[in-house]
Every structure is written in C-alpha cells, then in structure tokens.
C-alpha cells in the first residue's frame, strides 16, 4: 500500500551539464497529474520525464523539478543575417539623415535578436540517459517514502477495522438480549413477528463483517487500491446507518455511533491512499 504523499531527490555532477538536482514530490489527488518544472530549453524533455514517472506512480499530483548549475546546456548564438540587415538599414539612415556618428560594437550587439542564448539540444539529447538515471533514482526515493507512509496508514486502518469488528460483535450480542427482553411485553405472535421483521439487524451486521474481510484482503493486494477501498468503506457505512435506523435500544445506538465514527476516520485517511 502506498500513500500519495511523498518526497524524493537526487543530485549529481553530469559532465558538460554541470551540477544537476532533481526533486520529485507528490500529494493526494483524485487521479494522476504530473507537472514538470524544467530549466529553460528543457521543456521538450517533459514527455520523456512523464513516462518515467508514470511507470512507477499511478495516482497523485506529482511535481518534478530539475535545476542545473554550470555546464554547457546553452551556447551563444549570433544571427549574422539579421546583423547584416541592421547594418544595411543603419547605412541607409546615415545617408538619408547625413549623420556622421559611427555605430559602435556595443550598439550592434544590443540590437534585438543579434546575440542570444541558444539551447544546446544536441548535448541534452546525448545526456538524456544520465538525466533519466537521476530522475529514476529520485523517483525511487519518492516511492520508498510513499510506501513508508502507506505502511503507517495500513496499520492505522487495520486498527480502525478491529474496533469496528468489536463494536459489531457487541451490537449483535446486545441485540439478542434486547430483543428477548422486548418481545416479552408483546401479547400476540403477530406483534412479535412485526417487531422482529422491522428491527432485525442480523443481515446488516453480517454484511459489515463481509466488508471488513474484503477490505483487509484488498489491502494486501498490489497496485492502486484507494478508490476501491473507499467504495467498500461507503458500503460499510451504509450498513451501519441502516443498523442505526432500526435500533430500538440506546446501547445499540451508542455503539452504532462509535462504529460510524471509526468508518469516517477510515474514509478520511483513504483520501491519501494511491
């Protein structure tokens, strides 16, 4: 079982790219959402990174951030054709205005588009395997943290289920005693039958027990299970609500309220299960 909350990071020196830091964190989400924040010029790697993450994480809002320090991921680019066009225009302006001022090198390089930083895509493509390894290691760290929290959540859920099971057993035991005492006051068999028909909670309690066993079984299965477990918890809640609606005994009602509280605690924590 995995939580949807986790954190992982890795940092390494990659030749020519410099110092690379990868950070991946996740929070709960109803489905899968992967967001990448990459250095300028690396946006074309976003789909590759997404596929790496999707292979290990099936649900949650995942944010992957990569930063580079140093390296040669960018290079200086001079647009010579644009520079020629600028110089031709400036010569025309000088002749037209009879201006004798010289144009400095500083003026030329400051003109829009003449000198710019270009992405070194060839280098980034060559270094993608090394980047991928770093992302994979950070992802493994994230998954490990999600599993640790998932194990803690599993223990919590099992404790709540055991409480519910005890409450259901006590409700069943109390129901038998309360019914026996109640039917003694009826004068006719018809009254007894009608009362037993309207108040019998045996089926509801059996179904709650079935849902508890099913819940525990699915917890042991591999893969995402949060949505399925939440559905089972809803069914458990429905049976307990019906039990409460049929209750004619204050002690049974009190224990039903306790059981409902435990189920609500389960459903709250399930919002963070993958």
Image: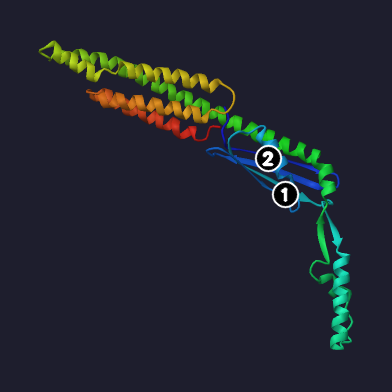
Residue 122: horizontal and vertical position, in percent? 85, 47
In the visual, does 95 lie left or right of 243?
right
Mark 2 → mark 1, Cα distance in angstroms: 11 Å
In the visual, does 217 lie left or right of 55?
left
Residue 249 falls in which quadrant of the image?
A: top left
Q: Residue at 87%, 84% (x, y): give it.
A: 94
Above or below, 24 against 226 in this view is below
Q: Secondary structure at mark 2?
A: helix
- Which residue is labeled 1 in the image? 43
Above or below, 81 against 107 in this view is above
Residue 28: horizontal and vertical position, in percent? 54, 39
Q: Residue at 52%, 30% (x, y): give it.
A: 226
Q: Residues within 10 Å of mark 2 (few under 14, many from 20)?
A: some
In the visual, does 80 lie left or right of 29?
right
In the visual, does 126 lie left or right of 259?
right
Q: Earlier in the sequence, mark 2 or mark 1?
A: 1
Asked whether disc 2 touches disc 1, contact meaning CB atoms under 8 Å apart, the reply is no
Quadrant where the C terminus sits is: top right
The outermost residue toward the bottom is 98
Residue 235: horizontal and vertical position, in percent? 40, 26
- Which residue is labeled 2 in the image? 50
Q: Secondary structure at mark 1?
A: helix
Above or below, 75 against 16 in this view is below
Q: Residue at 52%, 38% (x, y): give it.
A: 30
Q: Residue at 86%, 44% (x, y): give it.
A: 15
């Amino acid at each position: 079982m995995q939580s949807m909350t986790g954190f992982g990071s890795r940092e390494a020196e990659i030749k020519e790219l410099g110092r690379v830091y990868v950070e991946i964190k996740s929070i709960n989400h109803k489905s899968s959402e992967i967001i990448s924040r990459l250095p300028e010029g690396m946006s074309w790697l976003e789909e590759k990174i997404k596929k790496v993450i999707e292979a290990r994480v099936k649900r949650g809002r995942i944010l992957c951030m990569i930063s580079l320090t140093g390296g040669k991921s960018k290079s200086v680019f001079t647009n010579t054709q644009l520079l020629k066009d600028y110089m031709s225009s400036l010569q025309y302006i000088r002749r037209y205005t009879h201006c004798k001022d010289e144009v400095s090198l500083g003026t030329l390089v400051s003109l829009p588009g003449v000198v710019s930083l270009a992405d070194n895509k060839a280098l980034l493509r060559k270094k993608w395997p090394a980047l991928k390894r770093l992302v994979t290691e950070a992802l493994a760290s994230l998954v490990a943290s999600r599993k640790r929290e998932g194990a803690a959540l599993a223990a919590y859920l099992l404790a709540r289920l055991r409480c519910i099971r005890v409450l259901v057993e006590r409700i069943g035991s109390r129901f038998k005693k309360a019914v026996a005492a109640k039917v003694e006051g009826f004068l006719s068999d018809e009254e007894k039958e009608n009362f037993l028909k309207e108040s019998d909670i045996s089926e509801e309690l059996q179904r709650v027990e079935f849902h508890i066993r099913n819940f525990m079984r699915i917890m042991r299965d591999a893969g995402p299970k949060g949505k399925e477990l939440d559905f089972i918890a809803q069914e458990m809640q429905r049976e307990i609500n019906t039990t409460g609606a049929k209750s004619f005994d204050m002690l049974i009602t009190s224990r039903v309220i306790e059981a409902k509280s435990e189920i609500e605690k389960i459903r709250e924590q399930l919002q963070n299960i993958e």
